Amino acid sequence: MVEGTEMVRVPVVIYRGGTSKGVFVKEVDLPKDEKTRDRVVSALFGSPDKRQIDGLGGADPLTSKLAIIGPSSRPDADVDYTFAQVDINSPTVYFGAVCGNITAGVGPYAIDEGFVRAEEGETRIRIHATNIGRIIEARVPTPNRTVQVGGDFSIDGVPGTGAKIELNWADTAGANTGQVLPTGNPVDRLTVEGLGEIEVSIVDVGNTGVFVRAKDLGMMGTETPEEVDANEELIRRCDAITTAATEKLGKITLATYVAPPAEYTDHITGQTVGADQSDVLVRMIFMGKLHKTYAASLTNCCGTAAMIPGTLVNEAASESIAQQGQVRLGHPGGIADVEVTVEEKDGKLAFPRISVCRTARRIMEGYAFVRREVLEAP
């Protein structure tokens, strides 16, 4: 941080990672005191304010995200990555989960900022996700030992194409609770306020997901963000399911409702997505709204859940996924693919590869300014 008279400037880079956009900051450029750090972060984004008009946030949970990058604190990793979700309507900064989409920008950032030396052709970067204490391996294309941006790979929810960045989440299986099925069961019954008992599947890969049948919520699984966001009762029910699962585990969970493949409309392009284009429909409730696409951190979780016999995701998914080794998730903005390798060891399922591919792009670099009084607040 560089101090001026009334304002303090903070070196920042903005990246689009997957279907999200975030502010990247070096750990050394933020205050060490956690309370002061969080005040600075909220001020950088312009929170609390539903428009985030006085900061870098875009008034949407998908653009109110922070990546803090530093040298690796463990010998088996190349760089440390701490993710923060910045609340829009309160001065709260959440560190309890990891964002898969923003993770796509960590490898390119680490190379561009000198944390990692690029190799010829492709650079493998072992990212220590400090939020969950596990390693995410990124494969970044680096022809001529520089980060490649352009390419012919596309992901739904992002216009155009770019260079493909592969993220392997295998090490994050059971990261939050110690096992992929935290309760040991593919299906549990939760007692939920306002709903009574409801069947759910709780799966821990990257982040911990709680999955429920769309029909048990009176939904089809084909809803648009506009339809869901206007349905206050549905949001309340999903929040109650999340709360019940979180209390059961003592860990943060994220709620998704699932349904068998069906035709629906991509809310971004207006095009029809055929029933034969997906293996399972997913709709994720995130910070009181429907996620406009689907979180990459939940993509790997949901894809793994689909491969586990008996889960509600497996129940809803196409039978062909086991042979394909791939699950196509139909989300509001199109399709998200995840490749999952399944092995059986000592009577238990193991997942040596859980791969999600994204694109990323550096958008700007420079200084953001916060008022000095933010640093000096008691």
Image: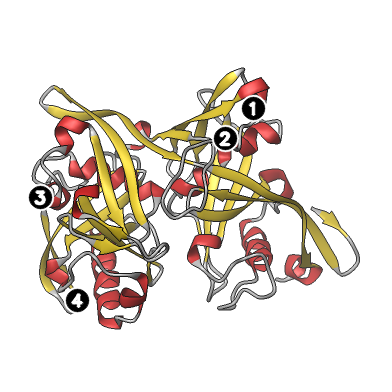
The answer to whether 186 appears left or right of 333 in the picture is left
Inter-mark Cα distance, 4 to 1:
48 Å
Inter-mark Cα distance, 2 to 1:
8 Å
Picture disc at residue 193 = 4
**Residue bearing the label numbered 2:** 107
Kindly state the secondary structure of the residue where label 3 is placed: helix
Give amino acid for label 1. Val
Q: Earlier in the sequence, mark 1 or mark 3?
A: 1
Which is more foreground, mark 3 or mark 4? 3
Picture disc at residue 315 = 3
Give amino acid for label 4. Glu
In this rendering, is residue 263 above or below 192? above
Give amino acid for label 2. Gly
Inter-mark Cα distance, 3 to 4:
25 Å
In this rendering, is residue 176 above or below 246? above
Residue at the outermost front position: 271
Q: Residues within 10 Å of mark 4 (few under 14, many from 20)?
A: some
**Residue bearing the label numbered 1:** 116
Kindly state the secondary structure of the residue where label 4 is placed: loop
- Give the image quarter of residue 318: top left
Give amino acid for label 3. Glu
Residue 240: horizontal and vertical position, in percent? 26, 72
Q: Residue at x 66, y 75 (%)?
A: 53
The answer to whether 62 appears left or right of 225 in the picture is right
Q: Earlier in the sequence, mark 2 or mark 3?
A: 2
